[in-house]
Image: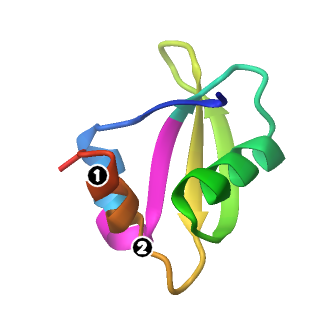
Amino acid sequence: MILKEPVKTEKAIGKIEFDNTITFKVEEKATKKEVKDEVEKLFSVKVKSVRTYTAPLGGKRAVVRLAEGHKAEDISSKLKMA
């Protein structure tokens, strides 16, 4: 499992609503392609782009932007984030 858990910060929640993106904590060695494939498979959505970065307190995060016609809000409700 590449995805560990969704990030539930205020900034990450705002990105769900305004940018149609959802942020996940991911495995350190995960590639963008692996993150994209896993999100598409788990949530039956199309991913437009994936950006990854190392968080200031450690750990890797992936910001996943969904393609038009797919809503990050749907994923967040499935994950019981809100």
Crowding at label 2, few (<14), some or many (≥20) Cα neighbours within 10 Å?
some
Please tell me which residue lies in front, 24 or 14.
24
Foreground label between 1 and 2: 2
Which residue appears farthest toward the bottom when viewing the image?
A: 69
- The disc at residue 71 is 2
C-alpha gap between disc 1 and disc 2: 13 Å
Mark 2 and mark 1 in contact (Cβ < 8 Å)?
no
Q: Where 44 sits versus 22, above or below?
A: below
SS of the residue under disc 1 = helix
- The disc at residue 50 is none
Left-right relation of 14 to 57: left
Asked which quadrant contains residue 3, the reply is top right
Q: Amino acid at mark 1?
A: Ile
Instruction: Write the residue at 32% across / 53% down.
Output: 78
Specify whether residue 22 is painted magenta. yes
SS of the residue under disc 2 = loop
- Residue wearing tag 1: 13
Instruction: Write the residue at 47% across / 13% down.
Output: 57
**Mark positioned earlier in the residue sequence (1 or 2):** 1
- Which span is picked out in magenta? 17-24
